[in-house]
Each structure stands twice: as C-alpha cells, then as structure tokens.
Amino acid sequence: MTLDHRLIDLLVCPVCKGPLEMLRDDASQPAELACRADRLAFPIRDGLPVMLEGEARNLE
C-alpha cells in the first residue's frame, strides 16, 4: 500500500496541531511524519500514518 501524499497535506501533529514533515528511509520510502516543534516522529506502517503520541519516537 502506498501513502497518498494528498493525505499528508491534511494531517497535523496530534499534540500541537503544527505542520508535519515526511522523513524517508534509506530506500527513499516514506517512513515517518515528524513534528519539529514537539520533536516527535510518528511512524508510517503499511502506508498508513500512526498518529498516536504513544507510538511516536523522540527526535534527537
């Protein structure tokens, strides 16, 4: 399943409602959506963003 990039434009951070930036893996595939303000990265699994604070990892 591929991620619909139009969806990304509609999503905001569930914590602060700020913009998200797509992070890609080594194969240039969408891997995470990052909120720079909260320093959180939300995973993309099977083409679907998991927008749960408990599933996010901290950005360094």
Image (cartoon, helix red, strand yellow):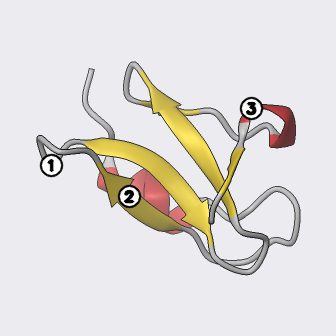
Left or right placement of residue 60 versus residue 4 in this view:
right
Quadrant location of residue 16? bottom right
Residue shown at 73%/77% (left/top)? 18
* Mark 1 or mark 3, earlier in chain: 1
Element at label 3: helix
The amino acid marked with disc number 2 is: Leu
The amino acid marked with disc number 3 is: Glu
Residue shown at 56%/62% (left/top)? 34
The amino acid marked with disc number 1 is: Ser
* Mark 3 or mark 2, earlier in chain: 2
Q: What is the x, y in percent for residue 54?
A: 85, 34
Kindly identify which residue carries mark 1.
28
Q: What is the x, y in percent for residue 1?
A: 27, 20
Residue shown at 55%/37% (left/top)? 43
Using the image, tell me which numbered label, if any, was put on residue 55: 3
The residue closer to the viewer here, 35 or 59, is 59
Q: What is the x, y in percent for residue 15?
A: 88, 61
**Quadrant of the image containing the C terminus:** bottom right
Element at label 2: strand
Quadrant location of residue 58? bottom right
Kindly identify which residue carries mark 2.
23
Report the Cα–Cα distance between label 1 and label 2. Answer: 9 Å
Q: Is residue 50 above or below residue 23?
A: above
